[in-house]
Amino acid sequence: MKIALIGYGKMGHAIEAIARSRGHEIVAIIDIDNRQDIDSEAFRSADVAIEFTTPATAVDNYLAVFRQGVPLVSGTTGWTQRSQEVKEKCEAADATFFWSSNFSLGVNLFMRLNTYLTRLMAPFPQYHPEMTEIHHIHKLDHPSGTAITLAEEIIAAHPGISSWTEDLQGALPDQLPIEHQRIGEVPGTHIIRWKSAVDTITIEHEAKSREGFALGAVVAAEWVKDKKGVLTMDQLLDQLINSSATHQR
């Protein structure tokens, strides 16, 4: 498979290594100094593009890729206030767009565990959730896109939680407080605690390196190659789980 990379920082390099190890070819590398090369024959020759950039540049990158007719996988966070616009532009262009706040397969299993645990906790108002997310000092946005996704899952599954906040001291009873920490080169840790007066239930996901995110992005790129529309990690995970269950029968 031919892959174009947009963003050539640490994640871009990790994705390149994983893609090559799986037998794929990198046909274009777009970074801050050659963004105009999205409009090039080399870029258009790609079967899929993988984008990891910044919140300020992501949407412009998406629209440029849609115009080139190349399926797109993106893991950039901090831009989702424009998600409806991106969805409409994708559909209008008959394009392919796969976005996830986190491409780690482990994190996405953790998200399912989060929803299940929240439903278990909902009948017990003595427990209240809080979240901590920890990332490297280079991460620009907060809370992380993964933390926001986890928070939205809690809000959807728990009638007593209506919103999230980063105001840890001023959080209202129906709000989920999210603390963010930026430490060294931490790839990403998410901790959810359900606290009562007598005990605490904790679930945690700790990434050990960027390789898990890079592998998930490449697996997503392999999956979207021949698909259209706005696609999600839930769809991919369902297929992986169903395929595994079929093979075990």
Image (cartoon, rainbow, N blue to C red):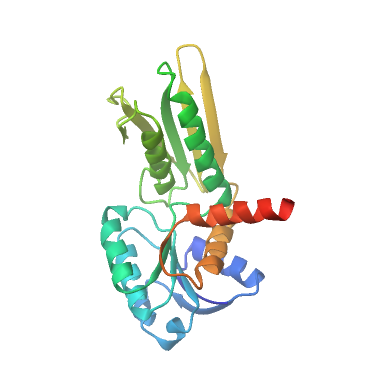
Q: Where is 177 relative to 217, above or below?
A: above
Residue extending furthest toward the top = 198
Q: Nearer the viewer, residue 68 or 159?
A: 159
Q: Residue at x 49, y 36 (%)?
A: 114
Q: Give the x, y percent position of residue 9.
A: 47, 64
Left or right of residue 223: residue 43: left
Q: Quadrant of the N terminus?
A: bottom right
| Residue depicted at x 58% and y 60% | 215
Residue 210 visible within the image: no
Residue at 65% in and 69% down:
22
Q: Is residue 235 visible?
A: yes
Of all residues shown, which one is farthest toward the bottom? 41
Depth check: 122 or 137 in front?
122
The image shows residue 12, relative to residue 70, as above or below, that is: above
- Name, please, the residue furthest toward the right: 249
Q: Position of residue 149 (x, y in %)?
A: 40, 44
Query: Relative to residue 37, is residue 190 drawn left or right?
Result: right
Where is residue 125? Give x, y as percent. Answer: 40, 18
Seen in the picture, residue 28 relative to 215 is either above or below; the reply is below
Q: Residue at x 38, y 81 (%)?
A: 37
Residue 247: where, in percent of width, then height? 71, 55
Which quadrant would residue 74 be assigned to in this image? bottom left
Q: Is residue 171 left or right of residue 217?
A: left
Counting labels gives: 0
